[in-house]
Protein backbone atom coordinates (compact mmCIF):
# COMPACT_ATOMS: atom_id res chain seq x y z
CA UNK A 1 0.00 0.00 0.00
CA UNK A 2 1.32 3.43 -0.97
CA UNK A 3 1.18 6.19 1.63
CA UNK A 4 0.09 9.41 -0.03
CA UNK A 5 0.95 12.98 0.95
CA UNK A 6 -0.62 15.96 -0.78
CA UNK A 7 1.07 19.35 -0.58
CA UNK A 8 -1.12 22.43 -1.08
CA UNK A 9 -1.03 26.19 -0.71
CA UNK A 10 -4.61 27.24 -1.38
CA UNK A 11 -8.02 26.15 -2.65
CA UNK A 12 -7.26 22.44 -2.73
CA UNK A 13 -9.68 21.39 -5.47
CA UNK A 14 -7.21 18.87 -6.94
CA UNK A 15 -6.57 17.52 -3.45
CA UNK A 16 -10.33 17.11 -2.99
CA UNK A 17 -10.68 15.33 -6.34
CA UNK A 18 -7.83 12.97 -5.41
CA UNK A 19 -9.16 12.18 -1.94
CA UNK A 20 -12.69 11.58 -3.23
CA UNK A 21 -11.42 9.36 -6.01
CA UNK A 22 -9.28 7.34 -3.59
CA UNK A 23 -12.42 6.58 -1.58
CA UNK A 24 -14.82 6.06 -4.45
CA UNK A 25 -12.55 3.86 -6.52
CA UNK A 26 -11.07 1.99 -3.55
CA UNK A 27 -7.58 2.85 -4.74
CA UNK A 28 -4.64 1.00 -3.20
CA UNK A 29 -3.42 4.10 -1.45
CA UNK A 30 -3.57 5.43 2.07
CA UNK A 31 -4.11 9.21 2.18
CA UNK A 32 -1.66 9.77 5.03
CA UNK A 33 -1.34 13.55 5.26
CA UNK A 34 -2.09 16.92 3.69
CA UNK A 35 0.56 19.59 4.22
CA UNK A 36 0.08 23.29 3.56
CA UNK A 37 2.74 25.99 3.64
CA UNK A 38 -0.01 28.56 4.27
CA UNK A 39 -2.08 28.57 7.45
CA UNK A 40 -5.11 30.07 5.68
CA UNK A 41 -5.25 27.60 2.77
CA UNK A 42 -8.89 26.69 2.13
CA UNK A 43 -7.88 23.11 1.36
CA UNK A 44 -6.90 22.43 4.98
CA UNK A 45 -10.50 22.45 6.22
CA UNK A 46 -11.57 20.45 3.21
CA UNK A 47 -8.98 17.77 3.98
CA UNK A 48 -10.08 17.62 7.61
CA UNK A 49 -13.70 17.20 6.50
CA UNK A 50 -12.57 14.29 4.37
CA UNK A 51 -10.90 12.75 7.41
CA UNK A 52 -7.27 13.29 6.47
CA UNK A 53 -4.55 14.50 8.87
CA UNK A 54 -3.32 18.01 8.13
CA UNK A 55 -0.18 19.94 8.98
CA UNK A 56 0.76 23.55 8.38
CA UNK A 57 4.44 24.26 7.87
CA UNK A 58 4.49 28.03 7.56
CA UNK A 59 6.89 29.28 4.88
CA UNK A 60 6.35 33.04 5.15
CA UNK A 61 9.62 34.88 4.56
CA UNK A 62 11.39 31.78 3.20
CA UNK A 63 11.95 32.53 -0.46
CA UNK A 64 13.08 30.08 -3.12
CA UNK A 65 14.15 26.47 -2.73
CA UNK A 66 15.30 25.87 0.82
CA UNK A 67 16.46 22.50 2.14
CA UNK A 68 16.16 23.61 5.77
CA UNK A 69 12.47 24.33 5.17
CA UNK A 70 12.02 21.12 3.18
CA UNK A 71 13.55 19.11 6.03
CA UNK A 72 10.52 20.11 8.10
CA UNK A 73 8.31 18.63 5.38
CA UNK A 74 10.39 15.44 5.39
CA UNK A 75 9.96 15.17 9.17
CA UNK A 76 6.15 15.39 8.90
CA UNK A 77 6.10 12.98 5.97
CA UNK A 78 8.16 10.38 7.81
CA UNK A 79 6.02 10.76 10.91
CA UNK A 80 3.02 10.10 8.72
CA UNK A 81 4.62 7.02 7.18
CA UNK A 82 5.38 8.63 3.82
CA UNK A 83 8.89 7.45 3.02
CA UNK A 84 11.03 7.09 -0.14
CA UNK A 85 10.21 3.37 -0.01
CA UNK A 86 6.43 3.40 0.21
CA UNK A 87 5.39 7.02 -0.28
CA UNK A 88 4.04 9.27 -2.99
CA UNK A 89 4.17 13.06 -2.65
CA UNK A 90 1.65 14.90 -4.82
CA UNK A 91 1.98 18.64 -5.34
CA UNK A 92 -1.45 20.15 -5.86
CA UNK A 93 -1.15 23.89 -6.18
CA UNK A 94 1.87 23.93 -3.84
CA UNK A 95 3.42 27.32 -4.52
CA UNK A 96 7.01 26.62 -3.51
CA UNK A 97 9.98 25.30 -5.40
CA UNK A 98 11.32 22.18 -3.71
CA UNK A 99 15.05 21.94 -3.06
CA UNK A 100 17.20 19.53 -5.12
CA UNK A 101 17.92 17.65 -1.87
CA UNK A 102 14.20 16.99 -1.30
CA UNK A 103 13.71 15.95 -4.92
CA UNK A 104 16.66 13.56 -4.79
CA UNK A 105 15.42 12.14 -1.47
CA UNK A 106 12.00 11.26 -2.95
CA UNK A 107 13.32 10.56 -6.44
CA UNK A 108 10.60 9.25 -8.76
CA UNK A 109 7.98 9.63 -6.06
CA UNK A 110 6.91 13.26 -6.46
CA UNK A 111 4.17 14.27 -8.90
CA UNK A 112 2.84 17.66 -9.93
CA UNK A 113 -0.14 18.92 -11.92
CA UNK A 114 0.39 21.79 -14.30
CA UNK A 115 -2.43 23.66 -16.07
CA UNK A 116 -0.95 23.56 -19.58
CA UNK A 117 0.35 21.07 -22.11
CA UNK A 118 4.00 21.01 -21.12
CA UNK A 119 6.54 21.94 -22.32
CA UNK A 120 4.31 24.87 -23.39
CA UNK A 121 3.67 27.55 -20.80
CA UNK A 122 5.66 26.35 -17.78
CA UNK A 123 5.82 28.42 -14.60
CA UNK A 124 3.10 30.73 -13.35
CA UNK A 125 -0.12 31.95 -15.02
CA UNK A 126 -0.10 29.25 -17.70
CA UNK A 127 -3.74 29.77 -18.62
CA UNK A 128 -3.16 33.52 -19.12
CA UNK A 129 -0.06 32.74 -21.20
CA UNK A 130 -2.14 30.36 -23.36
CA UNK A 131 -4.92 32.92 -23.94
CA UNK A 132 -2.45 35.69 -24.72
CA UNK A 133 -0.41 33.51 -27.06
CA UNK A 134 -3.53 32.56 -29.00
CA UNK A 135 -3.16 28.78 -28.95
CA UNK A 136 -6.25 26.87 -30.10
CA UNK A 137 -5.78 24.05 -27.63
CA UNK A 138 -4.40 23.94 -24.13
CA UNK A 139 -4.86 21.50 -21.28
CA UNK A 140 -3.07 20.00 -18.33
CA UNK A 141 -0.18 17.72 -17.49
CA UNK A 142 0.65 15.39 -14.62
CA UNK A 143 4.39 14.82 -14.44
CA UNK A 144 7.07 13.55 -12.13
CA UNK A 145 9.04 16.32 -10.48
CA UNK A 146 12.71 16.65 -11.30
CA UNK A 147 15.11 19.45 -10.43
CA UNK A 148 13.82 21.81 -13.12
CA UNK A 149 10.58 23.81 -13.12
CA UNK A 150 7.80 21.74 -14.76
CA UNK A 151 10.34 19.65 -16.68
CA UNK A 152 10.02 16.11 -15.28
CA UNK A 153 8.82 13.01 -17.19
CA UNK A 154 5.20 13.41 -18.33
CA UNK A 155 2.71 10.85 -17.03
CA UNK A 156 -0.65 12.02 -18.47
CA UNK A 157 -1.86 14.98 -20.48
CA UNK A 158 -5.32 16.01 -21.61
CA UNK A 159 -6.43 18.82 -23.86
CA UNK A 160 -9.20 21.42 -23.96
CA UNK A 161 -10.17 23.67 -26.84
CA UNK A 162 -9.44 27.36 -26.40
CA UNK A 163 -12.38 29.46 -27.63
CA UNK A 164 -12.03 32.88 -29.25
CA UNK A 165 -13.81 34.54 -26.34
CA UNK A 166 -11.98 32.68 -23.57
CA UNK A 167 -10.46 34.66 -20.71
CA UNK A 168 -7.90 33.41 -18.22
CA UNK A 169 -10.81 32.60 -15.88
CA UNK A 170 -13.00 30.68 -18.33
CA UNK A 171 -10.08 28.68 -19.68
CA UNK A 172 -8.82 27.93 -16.14
CA UNK A 173 -12.24 26.53 -15.20
CA UNK A 174 -12.38 24.24 -18.20
CA UNK A 175 -8.82 23.02 -17.66
CA UNK A 176 -9.48 22.45 -13.95
CA UNK A 177 -12.24 19.96 -14.74
CA UNK A 178 -9.71 17.91 -16.71
CA UNK A 179 -7.11 18.27 -13.94
CA UNK A 180 -9.57 16.66 -11.55
CA UNK A 181 -9.78 13.65 -13.87
CA UNK A 182 -6.17 13.06 -14.81
CA UNK A 183 -4.51 13.55 -11.43
CA UNK A 184 -6.40 10.71 -9.70
CA UNK A 185 -5.78 8.51 -12.75
CA UNK A 186 -2.04 9.15 -12.61
CA UNK A 187 -1.99 8.31 -8.91
CA UNK A 188 -3.94 5.11 -9.48
CA UNK A 189 -1.54 4.01 -12.22
CA UNK A 190 1.45 4.75 -9.97
CA UNK A 191 -0.03 2.81 -7.08
CA UNK A 192 -0.75 -0.15 -9.34
CA UNK A 193 2.90 -0.11 -10.43
CA UNK A 194 1.92 0.67 -14.02
CA UNK A 195 4.22 3.63 -14.68
CA UNK A 196 7.84 3.12 -15.59
CA UNK A 197 10.28 5.97 -16.09
CA UNK A 198 12.66 5.52 -19.04
CA UNK A 199 15.02 8.45 -19.28
CA UNK A 200 12.87 11.52 -19.66
CA UNK A 201 9.81 9.51 -20.69
CA UNK A 202 7.28 7.40 -18.86
CA UNK A 203 5.79 4.23 -20.29
CA UNK A 204 2.79 2.20 -19.17
CA UNK A 205 3.54 -1.33 -18.08
C1 LIG B 1 -4.22 24.13 -10.41
O1 LIG B 1 -4.62 24.83 -11.55
C2 LIG B 1 -2.94 23.37 -10.67
O2 LIG B 1 -2.82 22.94 -11.99
C3 LIG B 1 -1.89 24.41 -10.37
O3 LIG B 1 -2.39 25.14 -9.28
C4 LIG B 1 -3.82 25.06 -9.27
C5 LIG B 1 -4.21 24.53 -7.93
O4 LIG B 1 -5.60 24.52 -7.76
N1 LIG B 1 -0.61 23.78 -10.13
P1 LIG B 1 -6.26 23.73 -6.55
O5 LIG B 1 -5.64 24.29 -5.28
O6 LIG B 1 -5.98 22.29 -6.73
O7 LIG B 1 -7.73 24.05 -6.63
Image: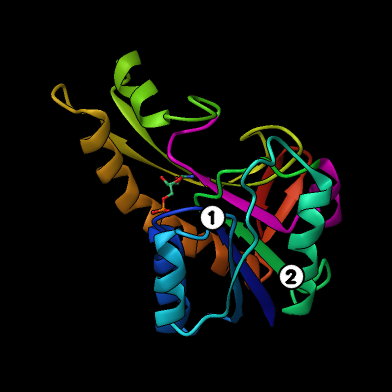
Q: Position of residue 122 (x, y in %)?
A: 53, 28
Instruction: Find out whether residue 116 is within the magenta segment.
Output: yes
Q: Is residue 187 above or below residue 152?
A: below
State which quadrant residue 170 falls in: top left
Q: On the image, numbered disc 1 is attached to which residue? A: 38
Q: In the orientation shown, which residue stands out farthest toward the top?
A: 133
Can residue 85 be seen here? The reply is yes
Q: Position of residue 142 (x, y in %)?
A: 54, 48
Instruction: Kindly report which numbered mark, 2 or 1, lies closer to the viewer in this rendering.
Output: 1
Can residue 25 be seen here? The reply is no
Q: Is residue 118 above or below residue 82?
A: above
User: If the image is split into quadrants, where does the C terminus sit?
Assistant: bottom right
Is disc 1 surrounded by few (<14), some (14 to 19) or many (20+) residues within 10 Å? some
Instruction: Find out whether residue 189 is within the magenta segment.
Output: no
Left or right of residue 12: residue 199: right
Left or right of residue 103: residue 143: left
Q: Position of residue 56 (x, y in %)?
A: 60, 65
Q: Is residue 82 above or below residue 119?
A: below
State which quadrant residue 136 falls in: top left
Q: Nearer the viewer, residue 197 or 109?
A: 109
Residue name at image x 82 percent, y 66 percent: 84
Residue name at image x 32 percent, y 28 percent: 137
Left or right of residue 73: residue 113: left
Q: How is the image coloured?
A: rainbow
Q: Nearer the viewer, residue 182 or 196?
A: 182
* Contact check, label 2 and label 1, Cβ < 8 Å: no
User: If the image is split into quadrants, where does the N terminus sit?
Assistant: bottom right
Q: On the image, numbered disc 2 is attached to which residue? A: 77
Q: In the orientation shown, which residue stands out farthest toward the front?
A: 61
State which quadrant residue 100 falls in: top right
Tag 1 secondary structure? loop
Amino acid sequence: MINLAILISGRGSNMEAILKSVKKNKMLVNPAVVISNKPDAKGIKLAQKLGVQTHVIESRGIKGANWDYDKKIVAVLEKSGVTPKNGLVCLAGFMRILSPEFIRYFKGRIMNIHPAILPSFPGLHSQRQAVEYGVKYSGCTVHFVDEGVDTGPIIIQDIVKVNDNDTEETLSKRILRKEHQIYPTAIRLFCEGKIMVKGRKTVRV
